[in-house]
Amino acid sequence: MTFPGAVRVGHDPVEILARMREQLEACGFPNLMIFTGGGGIENCSGVPATINEMLVQAHQGVLRVFPVWPRDRAASFGRLRTPGAFLVSAELREGQVGSVVVESERGRTCRLVNPWPGRKVVLRRAGQADELLAGERLEWATKAGEKAELEVAGPGR
């Protein structure tokens, strides 16, 4: 099961999905386990690990949403757990990322590759004034249990 590795190195997402479908059709069970004779835990975790990595990644302390997902395919996910004790939710429609929600379980600094390159981002948290973030990498301090919503800033911001 090399699909998660292919995602991590940024391989073509359309090819990843096509080849994974071929594997599932040839050797897959209804629970998405791929059995090719032998193997262990990777037989039952390859498909979900691949999809999770395509939707959200956390590498070296930096979150990325839809890093290896075909931009012409709508997708959404809710509360996927990432290293750093964050639960991340996001949606992709018509090639554009909608809002991104990050829930902090431990109150650590959150770093996110800006899903709207070149655009400013509004950060909303309960009980606080909206913040405007900018740059290739967005960063903010969190509190345990806090939920932050990010969306592209509208005109005039």
Image: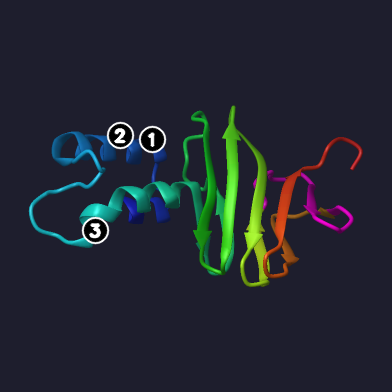
Quarter of the figure that contains the C terminus: top right
Is residue 115 in the magenta section? yes
Between 86 and 67, the one lying in front of the other is: 86
Residue 44 shown left or right of residue 54 in the figure: left
Q: Distance between the residues labelled 3 and 2?
A: 19 Å
Q: Say the numbered circle drawn on residue 18.
A: 2
**Residue corresponding to mark 3:** 42
Name the spot of residue 128 as percent of width and height, x first.
86, 58
Q: Do the residues labelled 2 and 1 touch (CB within 8 Å)?
A: yes
Q: Say the numbered circle drawn on residue 157.
A: none
Residue at 66% in and 50% down: 101
Chief SS of the magenta region: loop
Label 3 environment density (alpha carbons within 10 Å; few <14, some 14–19, many ≥20): some
Residue at 29% in and 52% down: 46
Helix, strand or loop status at disc 3 = helix
**Residue corresponding to mark 1:** 14
Between 98 and 31, the one lying in front of the other is: 31
Name the spot of residue 27 as percent of width and height, x first.
14, 41
Examine the rendered structure and indicate whether residue 123 appears above or below residue 70: below
Is residue 125 in the magenta section? yes
Name the spot of residue 148 as percent of width and height, x first.
72, 55
Q: How far apart are marks 2 and 1 (CA)?
A: 6 Å
The kind of residue on which mark 2 rests is Ala
Magenta span of residues: 114-131
Residue at 17% in and 61% down: 40
